[in-house]
Amino acid sequence: MSRQKSRDTGVEIALRKALHAKGARYRVHKRPVKGVRREADIVFGPARVAVFVDGCFWHGCPLHATWPKNNAEFWKTKIEGNRRRDGDTDARLADAGWLAVRVWEHELADEAAVRVLAVVASRRADLRSKVRERSSVPKI
């Protein structure tokens, strides 16, 4: 397991290239929320969107997850623990006003980039409308 790359995987780099080609600018391998020891693969700070690229095996993809027969109980515990941690991460980010976007390794990079950018654009539009609402309220 120690030889498995956890950063800059081929899938992650393909997604970053697709996002960059579409004009997106982002941070890489950053903790979105201080005090939460979880690092997102791609972070869009002002929109508060954290993107996680999840491996089908390691995170138990509903379409492609495989359950090894050798040492089955260990792997079941490991993968289910990863799933629980993913859910906990999503909840902690949501509590802090962030949105976690999960991209599976089997997704095509261009399609995932379009999906991520749609979420980022929506969040930016929501933030702009909130700013307009605050500025239009008369002060007494």
Image: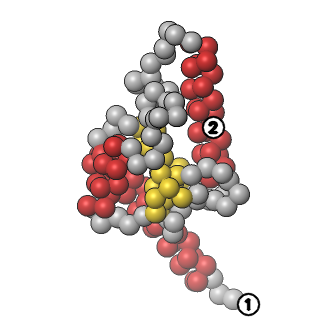
| Residue 139 occupies quadrant | bottom right
Q: What's the residue at 48%, 14% (across, down)? A: 68
- Image quadrant assignment for residue 87: top right
Q: Is residue 93 left or right of residue 27?
A: right
Task: Give the residue at the far right of this rendering.
Answer: 140
Nearer the observer: mark 2 or 1; the answer is 2
Q: Secondary structure at mark 1?
A: loop
Q: Residues within 10 Å of mark 2 (few under 14, many from 20)?
A: some
Total tally of numbered discs in the picture = 2
Q: Earlier in the sequence, mark 2 or mark 1?
A: 2
Q: Position of residue 103 (x, y in %)?
A: 42, 42
From this view, report whether residue 106 is shown above or below residue 140.
above
- The mark found on residue 90 in the picture is none
Residue 5 in percent (x, y) is at 45, 40
Q: Residue at x 28, y 54 (%)?
A: 18
Residue named by callout 1: 140
Q: Work out whether residue 114 can be spotted.
A: no
Q: Is residue 98 left or right of residue 114?
A: right
Instruction: Estimate the x, y position of residue 109 in percent, counting from the top left.
Output: 30, 46
Amino acid found under the numbered disc labelled 1? Ile
**Mark 2 touches mark 1? (CB < 8 Å):** no
The residue indicated by pointer 2 is: 85
Amino acid tagged 2? Arg
Q: Residue furthest top?
A: 69
Q: Secondary structure at mark 2?
A: helix
Q: Quadrant of the C terminus?
A: bottom right
Hey, which quadrant is residue 21 in on the image?
Answer: bottom left
Residue 98, x across and y down, in percent: 58, 57
